[in-house]
Amino acid sequence: MGHNNTKINETSVNTLPFKHVLLTNEQTFSAEELHKLSDSQFFHAEETDKCVDSLSNVSLLEKIIFIVDEELSRNVVEQVHYQCAVKIVFIIRSSTDNPQFDQWATSYMKIKSVPSSERLLKEIDYFKSRWLRTVDEFFSIDIFQSNSNLSDYSTLELNGSFLFIQLFLDILLRMTPLPTDKDEFIVECIKAYKNQPNILQDIHDFLEYYEPDTSLFWHSRQTFLYPLVNKALRLENIYLLYLCRFFMRDIRDELVRLQHTEPVKVYCGQVMSLNEIIQLKSLFYGDPTTTTTTDVRLRAIYIAFKSFLSTSLEKSVAEFYVAGQPVADECLVLFEIDATPNVCSQTNSFAKLHKSSAFENEEEVLFILNSIFRITDIHEEESKYIITLELCNNNDHTFKSVFESLKKDYSGEVAGYETEANLNSFATVLFNMKKYDLADKFFRRLYNELPPSHRDRARCCHNIGNVALARGQYKESLRWLNRALELFQQLWPFDHPGSGNTYHCIGSLYKSKRKYE
């Protein structure tokens, strides 16, 4: 599972290199507003032809936001709307009471009308934020397919390490928060982005103004935070996810607090890899030569998104981002999702953001991290795939018993069964997933954080020794296991099973060295 990186990579932030092309009267914008439109090219009304020629000659890889006054729009929109580089056309209205204009504008999917230049700046920020989530940030899922034998999880068809990722995030988000969590995250971010002043300013703002109840606001803003967290989730960067856990936990708590109270149908337009779609179709429909309609109806395919899933109540909003033709090895996907509040809990809540978002007028519904959905249909329509989903009740999953067994085995096998998630259970999961470098790092961290007389230092020594044993570092392993025996004798009752477990590890060590006497 995932990457073993122990630092933040500054390339985690997508800088969204949009260019702004403006065809307006000069008095439309104030000097301050023009300054905010970085990387801009300005054309006056009499330069319409020059503007159109300029847009016709840009690279297909460019990302253009085209801005035009209403009185100039009809002359140019038809010529620039279908340019691949033009991602959206903002028209600044001179009047909102113009039915003929409204009717004309509906013919062009890329058009977005705004009442003023001030509102335009907010809409541009929102568009860039949405584009980042939908197009620039690659979208990925984990897959689980049930089969006829659900009593033995070793026989299940697991795709994308579905259960392991569920387990990892379950432990991560249940860990007891510490007052130093945010500070540790900030320190690492400052190190990573020390040469990027714009991002450093965002980091300092985050340090000064962030509170748990503003997590959704920060999640929706176009800053370093969303792409950083999203990339960590997508690539399963364990160390970065550990640093971000306070932020993910705060979002979870806010979504639970703001839980939507009515059933909803929401939409999400995304770019996905063609291989993932082929895999989903194959799992859902099976072998067409042997699969019957009944087989498809009874087959249960579950997916979990590697992100906080951002959706819209407006289908047209989602469709906007999956218009056009996909590039090679990618495909456009429109998810249609039915979600009912009565199946929700702390693990699958969803909420309409409105007042909690940086964009108050959006119709965004956000789903909690790693919400699980069942696929009900997959079909192709024009140039995109339509995948219909329903939000699952965690208690109804066919893999619930499997997950509970896995959670018990993988979070407690080394350290003894934990009653609550903490750094010890987190490191234990990493050990059982054979992430020995990270497991060792976190076991040692816990050992150093505990007071000298704390009983759990004995368990830490045992676990560090066990990691060294798994690595074949026998001398290092024996040193820590002997230290564990000393601490068990000093700090625990004489009959505590920890001593027996440590003796067992020492026996395994000598067996590995073929020393049987």
Image (cartoon, rainbow, N blue to C red):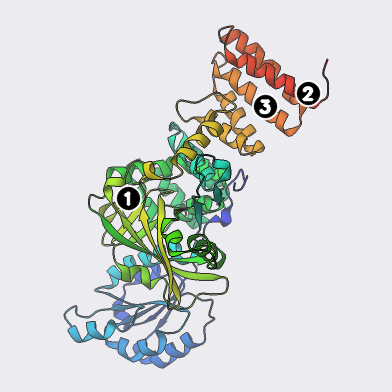
3 or 2: tag closer to the N-terminus: 3
Q: Are marks 3 and 2 in contact (CB under 8 Å)?
A: no
Q: Residue at x 44, y 68 (%)?
A: 333
**What residue does disc 3 label?**
466
Q: Where is residue 246 drawn, in percent x and y?
A: 43, 40
- Choose top left, top right, bottom left or bottom right for residue 174: top left
Q: In the depicted view, which residue is nearer to us: 269 or 42?
A: 269
Q: Which mark is residue 511?
A: 2
Residue most extreme to the left? 97
**What residue does disc 1 label?**
350
- Choose top left, top right, bottom left or bottom right for residue 270: bottom left
Q: Amino acid at mark 1?
A: Phe
Q: What is the distance, in whole Å, between disc 2 and disc 1 at their CAs?
A: 52 Å
Callout 2: helix, strand or loop?
helix
Q: In the depicted view, which residue is nearer to us: 412 or 380?
A: 380
Q: Nearer the viewer, mark 3 or mark 2?
A: 2
> Callout 3: 10 Å neighbours few (<14), some, many (20+)?
many
Q: Is residue 79 left or right of residue 436?
A: left
Q: Are marks 1 and 3 in contact (CB under 8 Å)?
A: no
Q: Amino acid at mark 2?
A: Lys
Q: What is the distance, in whole Å, between disc 1 and disc 3 at their CAs?
A: 41 Å
